[in-house]
Amino acid sequence: MNPYLLGFRCLSCGELHAPDAVTYTCPEDGGNLDAVYDYVRIGREVAPTDLTQAPSRSIWRFGPLLPSPAPSGLPTPLTMLGNTPLYRAPRIEEALDVRAVWLKDDSRLPSSSFKDRASAMVVAQALATGREAICVASTGNAAGALAAMCAGTKLRAIVFVPEGTPEGKLAGILIHGATVYVVRGSYNDAVRIAGEACKKFGWYNRSTGTNPYTREGKKTAGFEIAEQLAHWTAERGFRAPDSVIVPLGDGNILSGVHKGFRELQQIGWIERMPRFIGVTAKLAPSLARTFTSVSETFDEIPSTTIASGISVDVPCDGVAALRAIRSSGGTVIEASDEDMLAAMSTLARDGGVFVEPACAAAYVGLVEARRAGFLRSSDEVVLQLTGSGFKDVRSAVRAAPQPHTITSLDDIQ
Amino acid sequence: MNPYLLGFRCLSCGELHAPDAVTYTCPEDGGNLDAVYDYVRIGREVAPTDLTQAPSRSIWRFGPLLPSPAPSGLPTPLTMLGNTPLYRAPRIEEALDVRAVWLKDDSRLPSSSFKDRASAMVVAQALATGREAICVASTGNAAGALAAMCAGTKLRAIVFVPEGTPEGKLAGILIHGATVYVVRGSYNDAVRIAGEACKKFGWYNRSTGTNPYTREGKKTAGFEIAEQLAHWTAERGFRAPDSVIVPLGDGNILSGVHKGFRELQQIGWIERMPRFIGVTAKLAPSLARTFTSVSETFDEIPSTTIASGISVDVPCDGVAALRAIRSSGGTVIEASDEDMLAAMSTLARDGGVFVEPACAAAYVGLVEARRAGFLRSSDEVVLQLTGSGFKDVRSAVRAAPQPHTITSLDDIQ
């Protein structure tokens, strides 16, 4: 076990549990857990360049800050995971008058979504603890990631997705040999049944909000962004942007990327935190409603958005996300389905990246935050991209222009 | 211009044309052209580690062996292109009793196909020569790659694809803002109309077989494979495997990857050439028929394969591919549609990579070549993966098992 891992703190009661005393949520009150490390000791014993200049470019190079041991063995999608590109988008900078807009393109991970980071961490933990079967409830991407990360290992993957999951996402799960249950109901119904099934059959539960290792995998995106930003200004180690914009469903991606930066700051490797802007779907309003109140409790409100990746009735990691946004001085923005579809086109045309609607929400957030004056002209902003447009072709067809059908050269005007 | 570039040699008449004397095919007899460099001088003036240890990991680090200058500017999908992962597939090695099977996963390039390498090189050339519009005929992937590589530049992309192009591929082209013409006819009909349109409207033609820069882009996969193989055995520079297996449609990917290795050998950076095994679709038989004869001419035979990426009536770069296969002591294997679909499942389940049918043909080639004794148990083999399974979801649905639909926990047996 990582000697720097102190334990898991409950986000509700605040108690710190020893690493081997918990599996999922807090034994006291069921609150979500958050891994805590000895940041002072890491700062004393580890140099930032030990991580950023490690020969491997996988997420496993961040070992002192990870709860699970790196999976051993030959180079595979699991052992080589990470290091997605960070692009600039000069056309978008010009159009919106923002100094620097960076795109962290996690649609380029093996299963074409950000969720590989979380699934890899949970799979590493499952392998280290001798599990045989691993289960997840998912709107599609987490399940595809779990199936891909289990491929070629001895772990069996069992997934629960809601009806209406895009055909591409479904095919991308099934093809890796996972057992797939399509639940008549919503994503949150799938979460409940998956939880019951794990208890009944003894499967390890990877579901977001339940399993605290997912956030630990997701924070590696924060590490990578900070490392890549430093690289481009010829600095060693890590550097923070002014703002990070993240699509918001369960809130686990936002709380994960935020945690990556927060840990770098706690160790002393970056000086200040970026502001975190979360972007929800207007048609999945639970988290945004709570944000505008002062509370940390969420109503379960049926989601009807086409953006499958952020279609939740209630956010499973909402508390951590709210605290990340509020403590960083950020905000929550709501994106309409129409704006997300239009954003898919803009990102593809001007930024060269083809993403799914939930991911394009980050661009809607950029536009709205700039319009509202929340982002300044002098800001450096990072958009966390989370899933490929090829995973939801139906939405892409709605977002894209029409082709022309021709028989000969004469048909071209 | 690259001072090491001597010119373009016609594969038909053998004449060497000065770099600025040609644009597409040979002015004498219309044969396909092949770029030639001063390999002796490169060997004298460039160290292999100048390339393999360059700070940038993009294809542009191979500059002394590229015909076009690196596109300048901020980090974008175009300027950062390359460096896809090379995985091992231990499950597959065990099942087939082959010492080492590597998967070069080019489905992870920005447009989710290998074709980004070719499109990037042609776009770089178009930008360097002040072109305004660039055109391609494509079965889908080359067009998506062209659209993605033109995104954010001043270049307009115009593409011609055959009817029946998978919906995902089509959406992935349109979303980047390219003008798309769907041709009532085959891929080779699209090639003809695109050629006529380029002449009529003055567009730069990127079509495979017509434009000699595509092979120059594609050879960078060969450079990367040799570099990555050396890395894993802790060698500096480059190292060749025993065999490379490549899906075969027009033949341009195979002739490109082969050229990468051949140039490394001509410079003296690797000692021996790998054998090249090309895998065609049984239902696109033109190239395989010519291979079994002694000729270099191809009959136009209508293709009916579902594997859109290798669905050609006649191979546009067939001569170069045949010579690469024959000179390396390789062979051509024909894959049935059913075997390609089954191979999609095997690669996803055992190798963790989700690819389209045309790409899965490489795995069919591996199985058949091993069964026929063409590959030995002691061999080290590389499969060139060429396109993501998310680009052709209909085929993935055919290849994958079915999900179970449930309402509650009680529905699970």
Image (spheres, coloured by chain):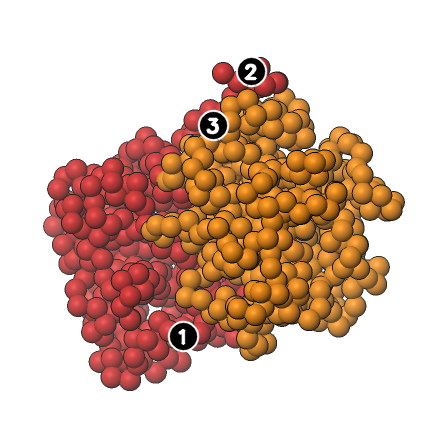
Chain colours: A orange, B red
Pointers 2 and 3 in contact (C-beta within 8 Å): no
Closer-to-camera residue (A223/B1): A223
Residues at marks 2 and 3 on the same chain: no
Closer-to-camera residue (B356/A22): A22
Residue at image location 42% in from the left, 37% down from the top: A130
N-terminal of the two: label 1 or label 2? 1
Q: Is residue B167 above or below residue B77?
A: above
List the residue tagged with mark 1. Answer: B54
Give the chain of mark 3. A
Residue at image location 55% in from the left, 22% down from the top: A200
Amino acid type, label 2? Asp
Label 2 crowd bin: few (<14), some (14–19), many (20+), radius 10 Å: few
User: Quarter-wise, where is residue A4 in the image?
Assistant: bottom right
Cα gap from disc 1 to disc 3, whole angstroms: 44 Å
Q: Is residue A139 above or below residue A4?
A: above
User: Quarter-wise, where is residue B300 in the image?
Assistant: top left
Residue at image location 57% in from the left, 25% down from the top: A199
Amino acid type, label 3? Thr
Residue at disc 1, secondary structure: loop
Give the chain of mark 1. B
List the residue tagged with mark 2. Answer: B411
Label 1 crowd bin: few (<14), some (14–19), many (20+), radius 10 Å: few
Q: Position of residue A39 (x, y in %)?
A: 61, 62
Closer-to-camera residue (A36/B258): A36
List the residue tagged with mark 3. Answer: A179
Q: Position of residue A73 (x, y in %)?
A: 35, 50
Residue at disc 2, secondary structure: helix
* Direction from residue A253 to residue B237 in the image, left or right: left
